[in-house]
Amino acid sequence: MNGRTCVDTAPLDEILTRYPASEAALIQVLQDVHRAYHYLPCDVLVKVAEALEVPLAKVFSVGTFYKAFSLVPQGRTIVRVCTGTACHIRGADRLIEEFERELKIKPGETTADMGFTVKTVNCVGACAMAPVVIVGETYHGGAEPAKVAKYIAEKEADHEN
Ligand code: FES
């Protein structure tokens, strides 16, 4: 909570205009904040608590409860490499290695330009398509290491738009 960061609050101000100042809007506001900032900045959570008149502890408890939320900065695109059993058997490790090579980061890390965060995840329920990589919202079944550069390039093109 100390060491305030300089976060642009304009996106938050715009988000808050869409909702009533009520605890009932908390999750939706946090979803929109996460979409706008790609994480939940501490300063922004303080302002959300004030605006919705919700105790800060409650805001943080919601922000830490849902796996979809991150309290640390993340890349614009999250890459999720499934390492469940089916995907592991079908070469998830080679996919991880290729993402490491292409993006020069390890799972759990974010590229210096904040473009990508790579994570490993447990079974995402698409074992028939193993191995599975999810890049942003896009599922790639039968993912191949040789196509990793293409998966990344597709998203980089989105980042520029
Ligand atoms: S193990 Fe990867 S989708 Fe099930």
Image (cartoon, grey):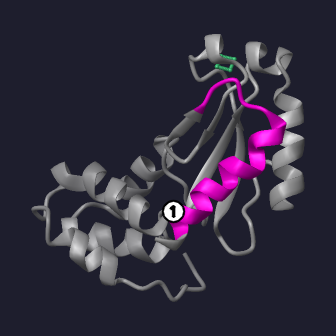
SS type, badge 1: helix
How far from the left and from the top, in percent, is residue 121? 68, 32
Res. 54 image quadrant: bottom left
How far from the left and from the top, in percent, is residue 154? 60, 54
Is 38 situated left or right of 22 in this image? right
Dot 1, how many residues are within 10 Å of its Cα: few (below 14), some (14-19), or many (20+)? few
Residue at image point 63% right, 10% down:
128
Residue at image point 67% right, 47% down:
151
Res. 9 image quadrant: bottom left
Rendered position, 142 above or below 134: above
Q: How many marks?
A: 1
Residue at image point 76% right, 26% down:
83
Q: Is residue 37 visible?
A: yes
Q: Amino acid at mark 1?
A: Asp
Is residue 14 rendered magenta in the image? no
Looking at the picture, tell me which residue is in the foreground, 145 or 107: 145
Farthest residue to the left: give it. Answer: 20
Looking at the picture, tell me which residue is in the foreground, 50 or 98: 98
Looking at the picture, tell me which residue is in the foreground, 149 or 115: 149
What is the magenta range? 140-159
How far from the left and from the top, in percent, is residue 112? 75, 73
Q: Quadrant of ligand 1?
A: top right
Is the C-beta of the residue carrying label 1 under 8 Å from the nearest atom of ligand 1? no
How far from the left and from the top, in percent, is residue 139? 56, 33
Q: Main secondary structure of the magenta part?
A: helix
Looking at the picture, tell me which residue is in the foreground, 148 or 6: 148
Residue at image point 14% right, 65% down:
18
Rendered position, 135 above or below 161: above
Check the picture and name the quadrant holding the N terminus. Answer: bottom right
Is residue 154 rendered magenta in the image? yes
The residue carrying mark 1 is 158
